[in-house]
Image (cartoon, rainbow, N blue to C red):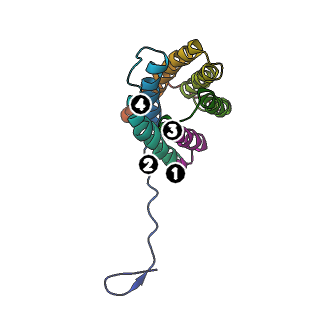
Amino acid sequence: MAIDDSGTATKPVAPANVEIADPGPLGLGAFALTTFVLSVFNANIVTLGVTVVLGLALAYGGLTQLLAGMWEFRKGNTFGAVAFSSFGAFWISFYILLGTKGVTVKAVGVYLLAWCIFTAYMTVAATRTSGAVLAVFVALTLTFLFLAIGDLAPNVNMTKVGGWLGLATAVIAWYASFAGVTNATYKRVVLPTWPLAR
């Protein structure tokens, strides 16, 4: 119960069922950009200044994706909520990991292998989303696999392969983000995403 200005008790009015915007393009965009920048270093295209990734990992890849994941919960999208919240946490943990002293290369390999396993089972669920999202998860699983091998072996060539796969993953994720925001803005399918759900 609420009390109005005249002192009369009133029943609270239920909020209108307001539809929120699709957080998917935001989450995919944050993931793509941060993955792209890190992958440039993993592919050994640029060799100095990897700390430029830190700000992106915390703010855009981390916090922004985490927020997108929370909004996916609000929309009732379990897949999007788990994916964006998890990868937001990945980037935040990556930010912390880069600032931690004494972490061995093989320990990072175990970290990357664990993320490979998570991404692989999310790839199974992605088969019911869209072709664009499925392609992101297939490419990302391979990226984590090669990066993990590169650190566990250790083998710098495997890390470079992981970097190039990461660049491909980023491009696919950017396309999926671009398609999502463009289609929503134009209110029609401008760029296909190839829905897979029946």
Residue under the point 51% across and 18% down: 163
Which is closer to the viewer, label 2 or label 1?
1
Q: In whole angstroms, how far apart are the C-alphas of marks 2 and 4?
A: 30 Å
Q: In whole angstroms, how far apart are the C-alphas of marks 3 and 1?
A: 34 Å
Q: Earlier in the sequence, mark 2 or mark 1?
A: 2
Is residue 23 in view?
no
The reply to whether the magenta stretch includes residue 95 is no
Q: Amino acid at mark 2?
A: Ile
List x then y, in percent, for residue 34: 44, 30
**What is the magenta segment's predominant secondary structure?**
helix
- Where residue 20 is drawn, which disc sits there? 2
Q: Amino acid at mark 4?
A: Val
Q: Earlier in the sequence, mark 3 or mark 1?
A: 1
Work out whether 69 lies above or below 135. below
List x then y, in percent, for residue 122: 64, 33
Are circles 4 and 1 on residues that touch, CB within 8 Å?
Answer: no
Q: Earlier in the sequence, mark 3 or mark 4?
A: 4
Q: Which residue is mark 4?
A: 53
Q: Which residues are magenta?
A: 73-93
Could you say which is closer to the camera, residue 146 or residue 167? 146
Q: Which residue is mark 1?
A: 74
Mark 4 is surrounded, within 10 Å at the Cα level, by few (under 14), some (14 to 19) or many (20 or more) other residues, namely many
Q: Mark 3 falls on what kind of element?
A: loop
Splitting the image into 4 quarters, where does residue 139 fall? top right
Q: Amino acid at mark 3?
A: Thr
Q: Amino acid at mark 1?
A: Arg
